[in-house]
Amino acid sequence: MNDLLTRRVSARWMMIVSSILLYITVVSSITLGPMNIGFFDSLKALLPVQSDLPDYVSVIIQEVRLPRTLLAIAVGGILAMCGTVMQGLFRNPLADPGIIGVSAGASLGAAIAIVLFGGVITHTAFLVLGTVPVFAFLGGAVTTFAIYYMGTSSNGTSVTIMLLAGVALGAIAGAGMGLLNYFADDQELRDLSLWTMGSLAGASWDAIVLAFVSLIVLGFLFHRYAKPLNALLLGEAEARHLGINVQSLKRNLILLTAAGVGVTVALSGMIGFIGLVVPHIGRMLTGPDHRTLIPVSAILGGLVLLASDMIARTIVAPLEIPVGIITAALGAPFFLALLLKQKGRLA
């Protein structure tokens, strides 16, 4: 009983501490850049009151740094939650959101938009988005439904077939990407390269609305599945004995994860290691209880991606490094160290 209470208090404190760290990182992200702007000047630029600040300061804060900061928080949170759910679902610390092949499908959709349609701007009824994110989301959605269709039969849904279908469709998408790369001109190759490396430079308020709606909806739905995920940690047989429909649980969580990954790839390109590494950090800090692990991972995911983006746009300012390079550079060594530490358990 005391141990359980200690864990709950520890998890609560961890959420508070991680939220404070996220707030500090948000302030740093808004104030730091090629042009450093003081905290109080940044606050003035955010408030809807008259100030003596130059117009360009308000533009930098309101139209560049704040949207980018908010998008990083939402995208990082979604990727971290999806990674947490995948690792819990398959009881595999190597699982990440890309395991179901949606990232590859979304990337192929983006590549089609860049090479065949030139990435022109389209106006939809709800959002003003480029063809690149729209096609990326459609590519992820088509891949999701194809995987689900292949894995579903009169006998129910086979998660194994869904995963294998994801691998196969990922290979097909990779072949399509290679073909488009072959026919692309120099500018299109550059755009493809930047997309596959991930970037938050195209942050807009429309994208932020979509990202935060997705974050809130997925967070609510994932939290509802927290207890079944905890039961699944005991094994599928034990979960069934507790009255959980394991096949339905896996199907629903895979579809929700696919939707989340599709949104993030559509808005920011391919950003790796957030969904792989952040859940491990959260698990080390709070334990395996998904009721606290999912929200803590969401906060940490936003924190890690925001910090990575801040490094990406300041380390060689005024130039900018794609944020996917930073997340890989930070995440890969951490993950290798984790593997070396746990290789006996994983063998």
Image (cartoon, grey):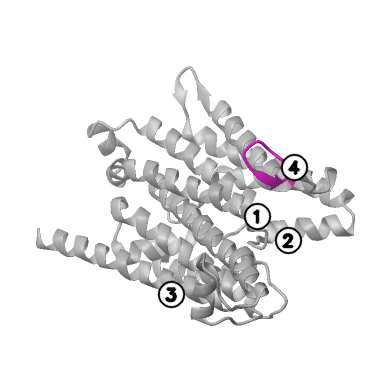
- Boundaries of the magenta span: 123-131
SS for dot 1: loop
Point out the tag, 4 or 1, that comes first from the N-terminus. Answer: 4
Task: Determine whether, in the image, residue 229 is placed left or right of residue 260.
Answer: left
In the image, what residue occupies the spot 16% across and 65% down?
6
Q: CA distance from mark 3 to mark 1?
A: 26 Å
Q: Is residue 178 above or below residue 142?
A: below
Give the residue type that dot 4 points to. Thr
Q: Is residue 26 above or below residue 98?
A: below
The residue to which callout 1 is attached is 269
Of badges 4 and 1, the one in the foreground is: 4
Give the residue type that dot 2 points to. Leu
SS for dot 4: strand
- Contact between labelled residues 4 and 2, with CB atoms less than 8 Å apart: no
The residue to which callout 4 is attached is 122
Q: CA distance from mark 4 to mark 3?
A: 36 Å
Q: CA distance from mark 2 to mark 4?
A: 20 Å
Q: Is residue 126 rendered magenta in the image?
A: yes
The residue to which callout 3 is attached is 24
Locate the C terminus and report the quarter of the image it occupies. bottom left
- Contact between labelled residues 2 and 1, with CB atoms less than 8 Å apart: yes
- Image spot of residue 110 (x, y percent): 72, 47
Q: CA distance from mark 4 to mark 1?
A: 18 Å
In the image, what residue occupies the spot 43% across and 39% down?
253
Point out the tag, 2 or 3, that comes first from the N-terminus. Answer: 3
Of residue 301 and residue 129, the one placed in the foreground of this image is: 129
Q: Is residue 305 above or below residue 139?
A: below
Q: CA distance from mark 1 to mark 2?
A: 8 Å
Within 10 Å of the Cα at label 2, are there few (<14), some (14-19), or many (20+) other Cα atoms? some
The residue to which callout 2 is attached is 194
